[in-house]
Image (cartoon, rainbow, N blue to C red):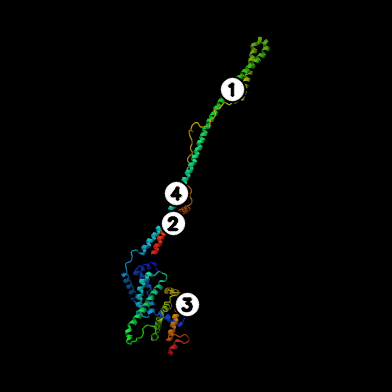
Amino acid sequence: MDELLLRRAQRGDPEAFEQLIGPLEQLVWRVCWHYTGNREAAEDCGQEAMVRIWRSLESYRGDCALESWVYRIAANCCMDFLRKKKRDRSVSMEPLREQGFDPADPTPGTEEQVVAKDDRQRLRETIAALPEDQREALILTQLEKVPYEEAARALGVSEGTVKSRVNRAKARLKEILSEIGELSPPGNVKRDERRSRS
Amino acid sequence: MSKEEMKTVTADPELDALLSEMAEEVPPMPADFHDKWMSAVREDAANKAPVKEETPDRTGTIVRWTRILSVAAVFVFLIGGTLLYRSSKKTLSSAVMMTESRKTDAAENAALTAGAIMGAAEEEAMDAAVAGEAMEAAVMAESMEAAEEEAAWEAAEEAEAVYDSFLPAAGDAAVNSEPALFAAYEAAASVKGADDTAERKASAAEKAPATEAPVPAATAAPTAAPTEVPTAAPTEVPAEAETGSFFADMGDFLSETWPYLLILAVPAVTASFLRRRKK
């Protein structure tokens, strides 16, 4: 990383920021996509994340890799976006619920929703239904293929904690997906046999 | 959270395969994604407060020149101070040696003065001795002359005695041959007298006692000031007092000036500490 370029970007030079963070926009896009599972949501989160990175760049001290720092900001931005979206959706639907309208909950995580959708989408939504700490550990290490040591630095926890969260996330995923028939349950029953049974 | 969970990640082939597929199935980034966030960044930069005039480059330049000047000042202090220290050391050594040489010169001058006085006294004594010798020689000459006269008188008396001895024997003949006999007698007497005289002269010259004439005492006290008292040439001051090596002198200089450096360093360090704390 060019120190001079970083200093220029931190002082507010947009061109220097473009040269510095431009190569990482793909990373931001991927993170937003994995978190949201939705193209539009990922784009909105991505734009918000890039602006937030621009405003927060002055606080970057170089104690971790720039990629880890960028991922951290993008993940926080996505979680904020999802919380806000969930809150807005529940507020907007309140009057309808009072009238007896009970629309299907669009937020992923419910078992019924997962069953009705594509495998990948189901998995994606299952991941989205995980607790935040397990979700971000899983996305960072299993989807973005970031080494555990670097992931620990990005998340601000120990490497053992990251591994523990990933194990729990995978166990939870397996449990949910096996219930809906996407994965073989803990045992010897294969996936196709369960589908045929259901 | 168990220790096992923290050590390794459980491998589940099916789940891992699904996750790998998910990782690869990322839709392409929108074409305008880059332009959108860049425009947002430029707009945000335009809305921000203007950047301060003191750019890091300029700050870096100032800091760099400050450091260069500080290092140069340290070198000027060390080298210049050491050179001045060496110069003062030489001057001090020369002054000390000059004082010592002057003391030596004074002593030498006093010694030379005394020597001159002694020399003058000795000269006078020698003059006196020479004068005494001259007088002695004169006395000796007079005594020799007296001795010679005496010897001549004695020779004459002996010749007369011989004449008298020949006189009876040649009484008769004398009457007849008095002139020849008298001539022989005179010849013999003259020969004998001459011989005796010469002999006496020689013996008188040898035996003349060196009677010591009273020599005027040479007094030691100088009657007059020495005509010329050679003064000792002033001792040449050595061109240079020996000094140690440059770095040894630098060490001596620092050992003598460290209290003053400490007094200067305390406010400088305090100011630097306060400036950093302010940042």
Q: Mark 1 and mark 2 in contact (Cβ < 8 Å)?
A: no
Q: Amino acid at mark 4?
A: Ser
Upstream in sequence: badge 3 or badge 1: 3
Which secondary structure, mark 1?
Answer: helix
Q: Amino acid at mark 1?
A: Ser
Residue B273 seen anywhere in this rendered image of the structure: yes
Q: Residues within 10 Å of mark 2 (few under 14, many from 20)?
A: few
Q: Which of pointers 2 and 1 indicates the residue nearer the eye?
A: 2
Residue B6 circle label: 3
> What residue is disc 1 on?
B143
* Residue B67 percent coordinates (x, y): 40, 59
> What residue is disc 2 on?
B262
Q: Nearer the viewer, residue A68 or B270?
A: B270
> What residue is disc 4 on?
B88
Q: Amino acid at mark 3?
A: Met
Upstream in sequence: badge 4 or badge 3: 3
Q: Quadrant of the C terminus of chain A?
A: bottom left
